[in-house]
Amino acid sequence: MDQLIAPNAVALQFLHCLANSERRTTPFRYWLLAGALPTSVVDAIVGLPFLPPGEAHFDGRRETNNSARVYFSPENQRRFPVCRDLADAFKHALVTSAIERETGTDLSQGQLRIEYCQDVDGFWLEPHVDIPVKLFTMLVYLSAEPELREAGTDIYDATPEHRRVGTAPYERNKGLIFIPGKDTWHGFSPRPITGVRKSIIINYVAPTWRDTFELA
């Protein structure tokens, strides 16, 4: 990854957040985040002119609605400064090296992928583990409405029943990190969503990632 001359405000905020994250080890290793991004960046992402998908089909998988998904691609980085600032931050060597130290993952060949999600009532995600080509997964929640407090990512155990054993707090600028593995079962159990459940998903993916148009 290209090393920038100096970290921007997004990178500095995230480095502070990561250093103060809450570390959990059961049923797998994950980190809970608070204050992941500068407030101005959260405001700018929420203000992006992308509408929630109007005719989404909900079957427990995001890929069902691939044509409506939004990424911080080079084109969107040219259009919207916040997309560029976020991508620059997570390409910075200080950020990737801090993630490697904290989590033990190897990002030396990682490619950055950032998705902007706007989930509405009817959305759900079946319990799943991320595909092996994903090296790192981070979610940051963006909406401030108190009605969404129970709309965080669900954590499941590795039993055949995949019992829900926890839920990440859904609050503005809070989030979740995990390193994808065979036991990192997560999803979003069916329940009502009042309003729009906005979030970003930040991944580093292996060089074999096929859908290069998704990359930052």
Image (cartoon, rainbow, N blue to C red):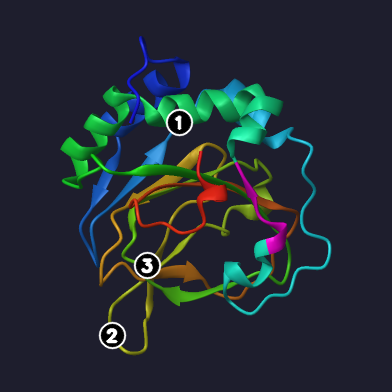
- Quarter of image, res 145: top right
Residue 178 place in picture, x, y as percent? 31, 53
Tell which of 15 and 180 is nearer to you: 180
Residue in view at x 38 percent, y 43 percent: 111
User: At label 3, which amino acid type do we have?
Assistant: Ile
Which element carries disc 2, helix, strand or loop? loop
**What label does residue 131 carry, if any?**
3
Compute the Cα span from label 2 to label 3.
19 Å
**What label does residue 35 carry, if any?**
1
Q: Which residues are magenta?
A: 67-71
User: At label 2, which amino acid type do we have?
Assistant: Thr
Q: Is residue 151 left or right of residue 100?
A: right
* Residue positioned most to the top: 5
Query: Would you say the residues marked 1 and 3 are in contact, meaning their CB atoms lie under 8 Å apart?
Result: no
Which element carries disc 3, helix, strand or loop? loop
Answer whether residue 96 is magenta in the image.
no
Compute the Cα span from label 1 to label 2.
33 Å
Tell which of 67 and 190 is nearer to you: 67
Q: Is residue 91 above or below residue 105?
A: above
Query: Would you say the residues marked 1 and 2 are in contact, meaning their CB atoms lie under 8 Å apart?
Result: no
Image quarter where the N terminus lies is top left
